Amino acid sequence: MRLPPDDRSSSPYTGYTRAHWEAAADALLAAVEPFATPDRALYHFPGRRVSHSGRLSDGLEGYARTLLLAAFRRDETALGRYAEGLVAGPGGVWPRVTDRSQPLVEAASIALALRLTRPLLWDRLGQGVRERTAAWLEDALTAEPWPCNWELFPVTVGGFLAEVGHRPDAARKAVDRGLDRIEGWYAGGGWYTDGDGRKFDHYNGWAMHLYPVLHAWLAGDSALLDRYGGRLEAHLADYARLFGGDGAPVHQGRSLTYRFAAAAPLWLGALTGRTPLAAGETRRLASGALRYFLDRGAVDSRGLLTLGWHGPDESVLQSYSGPASPYWASKAFLGLLLPPDHAVWTAPEQPGPAGRADAVTPVEGPNWLIQSTCSDGVVRLHNHGSEDVRYDPYYTRHAYSTVTRPRSSPPDNTVTVGGDPLRSDIVPLGVGEDWAASRCTAGRGASVTSLVVADGAVEVRAHLVTGAEPGAEVRVTGWAPGEDERAELVPAHGLAEEPGPALRGVTGDGATLFVALVRLTAEAGPAPLPDLVTVETPERYDLTVRWATGRRRRFRFAPGGNSVAPLDGPAEHSPA
């Protein structure tokens, strides 16, 4: 992909300006055009992989997701080509929208694109084309979604159909129904779970916030925008911390092949005026994410987005991932709706949280602890509250980062009891200024109560194992490092080193406590871990952490593992 030269005067961190975003959008749109069918209603990208929805649905996905990119770009020439597809698509080429079908997802992208570009596209269509398109979209008003972010697809379609006067009562009913359904999933502090349970990941930004906030903004509904925009603003205060110094989002959750879609909520906050971030910080984070992937092979020699993370990589895919799935990355270009003279495009870039200072930040909604270090730009996410066993290991590991990815053998960041790495039924037990804790069901009928305490790049991880037979083997693993990182795992209590990147211990009578010192760093020559932190277990269920800086933290586990509580208030200082 050919982009303008870097502009390091206004963008000292990424080199990217609006011109780079426009050039990237133009290149992506030009690359997909040869793969349109003659009637331009479907886009079939090369490759043998077909999603579980089938080739026809995959072709519709190619049309809808690249149309969304053209809508954000507001490119009249490209939109004209997609107008041709609207002549044939709704007239019998596209599969119908039915209950829990992939066309329901793509209907939302088409409706949003039509709503955003109404004077440029919808209003220029012939009456018959408009009627057929509205009739095709109408099925989305009553189709049953999967009980997750899919509930927002009828909302998006309904908002558009109500605006153009097509079955407005039914359209408004679909909007109200979908917005009502997501209320039960709001966990507070700007975070939603993606359906029942505790499914927290990037869908919060590019789905759970994106659709209701855009609907409220486009509808000019100030009450709705106050509600959903306020939640977005709270979310972005945490979300901004999930990008590394190199621009990478944290490698956690499903649909990772959407890549720089992670930038969408950053732009959305600026677009609606509901953001805690400075304009230069917004652009730095968003441009950092775009550049991170473009520099690492996300686009192939034909200019097409590949199925993977950096380059092609089927290990990060799900069964619903088809050849056009990566083009939900189009959401990242939402920032082009902001005019060229807006501050997000004119203000000098400012560093994001990972580039300003070391930080350990509790996130109450998902019960996460975010740990970042500015010297290497690494962000670590300690997961003590997110779970979706359908997509393990992308939800149930104890930790994720911007520079590592889940490893299968041996599995990283796990506690294995009796040879079984199971971690399910995660129950959050709280977060504090430098700690997070949870309880889960583990292998062989055991339970594990886990605590992490962090400072700088260093972690103390403690695990209380209950319900296991005496003599059961417990294995603890840490980080699987990337090419440029160093991962360390040091036994501190109840554990011993064994060959391979793991520690081993054995349960005793009753509950048994295991403690390890852990570090993931890209710093050269860091001080030895034992020089930075020591741990003591003065009582069977007590843990004292002493940092070399003089800080002390004390915690107590309940004997049955039902709770972990700090025995002090904010971190105390004691003689080093």
Image (cartoon, rainbow, N blue to C red):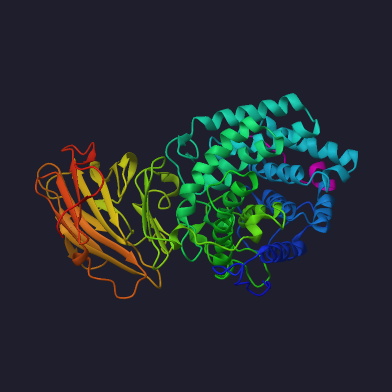
Pinpoint residue 17: horizontal percent, then vertical percent: 65, 65
Up the image or down, 451 lies above or below 216; here it is below
**Residue closer to the observer: 301 or 429:** 429
Q: Is 119 within the magenta?
A: no
Tell me residue 165's x, y (percent): 80, 30
Q: Nearer the viewer, residue 376 or 368?
A: 376
Q: Quadrant of the N terminus?
A: bottom right
- Residue sitting at x 70%, y 63%: 28
Quadrant containing the C terminus is: bottom left
Q: Residue at x 30, y 51 (%)?
A: 421
Q: Is residue 297 left or right of residue 405?
A: right
Quarter location, residue 529: bottom left
Q: Is residue 100 visible?
A: no
Residue range (magenta): 87-100
172 or 495, nearer to the observer: 172
In this rendering, is residue 224 above or below 521?
above
The residue at 84%/51% (across/down) is 84
* Magenta highlight: main SS: loop
Looking at the picture, tell me which residue is in the foreground, 157 or 391: 157
- Pinpoint residue 349: horizontal percent, then vertical percent: 57, 63
- At 55% from the left and 41% from the top, the residue drawn is 208
Q: Does residue 553 appear in this view? A: yes
